[in-house]
Amino acid sequence: MQPDFLLQTDRERSAPVSTLCDLFDRAVAAAPEKVALRHRGRALSYREMGRAVVSLARRLESIVAPGDIVALVLPNSIEFQIAYFAALKALATPALLNPAYPAAELAPLLRDVTPRAILCGPAIRETLARLAGDLGVKTMICLGQDVSITDLMADLAGPLGLPDATPQTPGALLFSGGTTGVPKAVEHTHGNLVASVRAMEHIFRPRDSDVFLPIAPFTHMYGFLQGVLVPMSARGETAIPERFQPEQIVELMVRHRVSFFGGGPPAIYAAVLAAKNLANADLSALRICPAGAAPFPVELMERWRRATGICIREGYGMSEIAPISGPTAQSDIRPGSVGKPVPGCDVQVVDLATGLGVLPRGETGELRVRGPHMMTGYRNRPEETAQTVRNGFIYTGDIGYLDEDGFVFITDRKKDVIFVKGFNVFPREVEEVIYTHPKVTTAGVVGAPDERSGGERVIAFVVPRADETIEAAEISAHCVSRLVSYKCPDEVHVLARLPLTSAQKLDRLALRRQLMTQMAAE
């Protein structure tokens, strides 16, 4: 039996939503004439969205079998939303890949999930066509060229001849870095994701009158929930920005009377605060401002409150289970905290030595969590799944504590992850790219505080091969051609040697100390 918080409203208690297809169908049936999506001057009603989804699902039905993977390599757009729900309707498993990734990063992800088909946009079509050929993927549909949303909406084909999805049916593959920094596919079922939506609703209480403005990529767990699933469940309207440009974001918030701003990490809020048109903007409709994906400075929260009159609600989650905690209207906001655990989610603090001893309130250790919305595992990675999921809990790798009132505080990181504008950057992944430069003998990557964004910057240290000379600009250009922008080093330092531990391993702590000393002297 589902916990009460998983049931959407009183009118649905007799037949609770159990799959994402239920979620979609009920929204289309309940609000057919209401605007569902806005993007680049277009607006689609729920009825039109429903037609487009069924039409694309019928095309997919002839290409993929139930359970086959369909890779979605699409930016935040109407096309992404149509493609995602169409894949679900066709009983395929959508794998969400960031179209901002260069070919060198997309190739191993596609190879990992072995999709039967790829859905993409015009901007990345040529790149994906080459990759599809290399990987033996025979079907690729470019939305906007091979078929348009207008074409799909005009298709009056009958219903699909497929059985209904179940809570156990795969609902999404989202990519997350692992302990090695190698991206891996996090598997979620329809049931997992419905539970995630209900937990988000417990925190934020969205309304059908809400206008949502998402910022984070829909391929990121935060953006996926805030920009795709929660608005659909609420039957609200979603205004999708063409790109993140602070003045444009403020203009959209005013024009569409945005009430639910899915800002995300500190860098987003800091940029909007710097927008020239913010001071005179009418944001009287604004009521919910979530934050997540990176630690949020209290001072920045206060600046936002002074500018808009709205308090930022910082929550906590990860690709493997989200949300874990958040501040509700009942629990209120506690500075420095990421709120209380959502109902049905068990958060424990355990000792760092064994990970088994549960610590009392106020003591710091590693956070482990479990709940109805946790992942089923990492695709094709049983060893990494076993490392992360132990004794029925997901071990987060984050260090923190629970206070006497049950609020969750994150104080440090067990891993060496660098938080850049809401994204996790794994040092080894960047180092591996730097190592491919022919002049490099060794490399080390660490994070440094970024006062502007409230997050961190990627800093690289390299040692040249004997008799070689390296310019920092060479390494920067090398990374730009092989990594998505937020993973590229903000600074590159050329050294004669890197500090090592007694075990001859890279001493990242020493690198950070060296960097902090240098920054303090500047």
Image (spheres, rainbow, N blue to C red):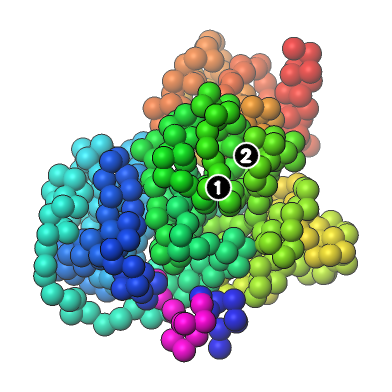
Q: Which residue is mark 1?
A: 286
Which quadrant does the N terminus fall into?
Answer: bottom right
Taking depth in this image into account, of 121 and 70 the one nearest to the observer is: 121
Depicted 81 relative to depicted 295: above or below: below
* Among the 4 quarters of the image, the one containing residue 138: bottom left
Which quadrant does the C terminus fall into?
Answer: top right
* Among the 4 quarters of the image, the one containing residue 517: top right
Looking at the image, is mark 2 or mark 1 earlier in the sequence?
1
The structure residue drawn at horizontal position 78% and vertical position 27%, both measured from the top left corner, is: 513
Q: Which residue is mark 2?
A: 308
Taking depth in this image into account, of 141 and 137 the one nearest to the observer is: 141
Q: Amino acid at mark 1?
A: Leu
Q: Badge 2 local density, few (<14 within 10 Å), some, or many (20+)? A: some
Q: Amino acid at mark 2?
A: Thr
The structure residue drawn at horizontal position 82% and vertical position 69%, both measured from the top left corner, is: 358
Across and down, in percent, residue 185 comes to 45, 58
Across and down, in percent, residue 140 comes to 19, 52
Q: Give the magenta part as a residue range.
A: 9-21
Look at the image and tell me whether residue 85 can be seen.
Answer: yes
Q: Is residue 11 magenta?
A: yes
Look at the image and tell me whether residue 175 can be seen.
Answer: no
The answer to whether the residues at label 2 and label 1 have Cβ atoms under 8 Å apart is yes
The circle on residue 81 is none
The structure residue drawn at horizontal position 52% and vertical position 33%, both measured from the top left corner, is: 281
Q: Is residue 281 magenta?
A: no
Q: CA distance from mark 2 to mark 1?
A: 8 Å
Taking depth in this image into account, of 139 and 74 the one nearest to the observer is: 74
